[in-house]
Amino acid sequence: MGLDQYAYIKNAESGDEGESPKFIWRKHSQLQTFMEALYTERTGLDATDLNCGELMLQASDIDRLEKAVEDSALPHCEGGFFYGHQFQDEQASEYRDYDLDFCAWARTQIQAGSSVIYSCWW
């Protein structure tokens, strides 16, 4: 059990998902905290509603995420047994390059007209 996170594309015209998740994270609690804050900001819903839900990312979201990763400024996770918060600094460090690769990929997909989706399950 634990936090599993995914990013994939949806075709803008048909709404069909890509073949499979392009990016997969496991217990990257600081990324989850970032996405939960974005989800709440965008929808007004509780962050727990993102569990098994979808968050469509915009170019400005990718810019904010990329800056936070580059500056080692992803938000600190306050807890959550399933999130792996007890080793969140190590995870953020280990996922840094992967997160930056995700940002570059997501930006390209958005510019090409696809919808980039973040989803999680815990």
Image (tube, helix red, strand yellow):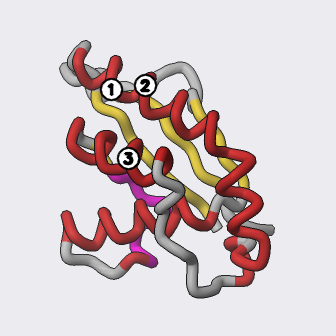
Amino acid bearing label 1: Arg
Q: Is residue 69 left or right of residue 106?
A: right
Between 78 and 114, the one nearer to me in the picture: 78
Q: Nearer the viewer, mark 3 or mark 1?
A: 3
Q: Could you say which quadrant of the image residue 97 lies in? A: top right
Gap between marks 2 and 1 measured at Cα: 5 Å
Amino acid bearing label 2: Ala
Q: Which residue is mark 2?
A: 104
Determine the residue positioned at 35% across, 70% down.
37
* Numbered label attached to residue 67: 3
- N-terminal label among 3 and 2: 3
- N-terminal label among 3 and 1: 3
Determine the residue positioned at 74% across, 72% down.
84
Q: Which residue is mark 1?
A: 107
How many marks are shown on the rendered structure? 3
Between 14 and 101, the one nearer to me in the picture: 101
Q: Quadrant of the N terminus?
A: bottom right
Residue 34, above or below 14: below
Residue 85 coordinates in the image, percent (x, y): 70, 76
SS at badge 1: helix
Amino acid bearing label 3: Lys
Q: Decide: marks 3, 1 in contact (CB < 8 A)?
A: no
Q: Residues within 10 Å of mark 1 (few under 14, many from 20)?
A: many
* Numbered label attached to residue 3: none
Residue 51, above or below 63: below
SS at badge 3: helix
Q: Quadrant of the C terminus?
A: bottom right
Identify the residue at the far top of this view. 112
Q: Decide: marks 3, 2 in contact (CB < 8 A)?
A: no
Q: Decide: marks 2, 1 in contact (CB < 8 A)?
A: yes
Bounds of the magenta segment: 48-55
Identify the residue at the far front of this view. 71
